[in-house]
Image (tube, rainbow, N blue to C red):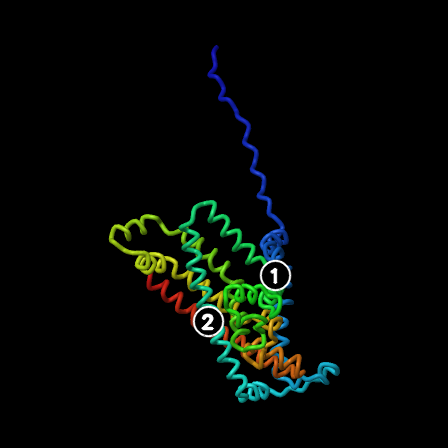
Amino acid sequence: MLTAPQAETRPAAPAAPPPVRRPARRGRLAAAWPYLLIAPTLVGTAFLLLYPVARNLLMSVQHFRMAELIRGDAEFVGLANYTQVLGDPDFWTVTGRTLWWTALNTGLIMLIGTLAALMLKALGRRMRLAVMSGLVLTWATPVIAATTIFQWLFQSRFGVVNWALDALGFHSFQNYAWFAHRGSTFFILVALIVWQSVPFAALTLYGGLTTIPAELYEAARLDGAGAWQTFRLVTFPVLRPLFALVTSLEVIWCFKCFAQIWVVSQGGPGDATTTLPVYAFQIAQSLHKYDLGSAVSTLTVLILAAALVFNLRRMFRQEGEAL
């Protein structure tokens, strides 16, 4: 007798293993790993930047002279140092000179840097490479080395500048002492600062020029726009944020300039080239009034910060209007 085939019995599927839970400690370590990587940089920045700023602020509200530097028992005097500095007419004279110095240098740097960037865009490949190489080498020259070179160039007896001017028929410049006159010393320092700063502005702006679509220039030419109109209506509006950023960086560079002035003239002749950083150094190191020097330094930072905040706020506002 035939019987119905029995149904096949399949083995039951094995149960899924329970999910493996990673230890909470490993998860916390993975989340903290990026912060651990940047921790050395943050510690170094805090030690090299934040600590000096905090120490300077503390000294500016203390009576801190040579005796306190040795003994270490400075007395807290509040805002007395700031009151004394702000009541000194010399401080306001130096502040005005610093603002004038910064505006003149920044204006020349941006003008020459913009022209150099436009020239780079118009040059051929080989000539552009040569000019850019020269700009990079100029930018890479150490500050003290470049300052020493300018001192040699304008040396009264053996300087190349006096020799060239005398050879061109300007015999009044034979043995001319450039560093003994207020105007000529100021001129040399302006030339030095501009020469050192133009490469950065030119190369940065040239990089921005390469991002402007060629169709915009073509449309401007079809509309009959000249070189100046093309720059005013196409180049500058597109690169306005970049111009604002480079201008802000150059303001910082010129405002805090110290090494070149100190090496060339130490703020002289007289006080013709004394700016706020030089003024603070003179008070602190020459007169050993470290408290007043710290107060001047703090006020210098506040003035610079106020100028930069105003400029950056205007830049962001213009970007918002453009969007």
Q: Nearer the viewer, residue 28 or 68?
A: 68
Q: Is residue 262 left or right of residue 66?
A: left
Disc ID at residue 104: 2
Image point (61%, 48%), residue name: 22
Q: CA distance from mark 2 to mark 1?
A: 23 Å
Where residue 65 appears, as percent x and y from the top left, is 68, 84
Q: Which residue type does callout 1 highlight?
A: Pro
Image point (52%, 55%), residue name: 135
> SS of the residue at dot 2?
helix
Q: Which residue type does callout 2 highlight?
A: Leu
Where residue 182 appears, as percent x and y from the top left, is 54, 78
Residues at badges 2 and 1 in contact (C-beta under 8 Å)?
no
Residue, far right = 71
In this rendering, the answer to whether 250 lies above or below 210 is: below
Disc ID at residue 142: 1
Q: Nearer the viewer, residue 245 or 51?
A: 245
Where residue 4 appears, as percent x and y from the top left, is 46, 16
Q: Which of the two labelled residues, at mark 2 and mark 1, occupies the earlier sequence position?
A: 2
Where residue 32 appears, as percent x and y from the top left, is 60, 56
Question: Which quadrant is home to the C terminus?
Answer: bottom left
Q: Residues within 10 Å of mark 1 (few under 14, many from 20)?
A: few
Residue, far left = 223
Q: Residues within 10 Å of mark 2 (few under 14, many from 20)?
A: some
Occupied quadrant, residue 240: bottom left
Q: Nearer the viewer, residue 139 or 36?
A: 139
> SS of the residue at dot 1?
loop
In this rendering, the answer to whether 102 lies above or below 288 is: above
In this rendering, the answer to whether 119 lies above or below 270 is: above
Image point (56%, 70%), residue name: 174
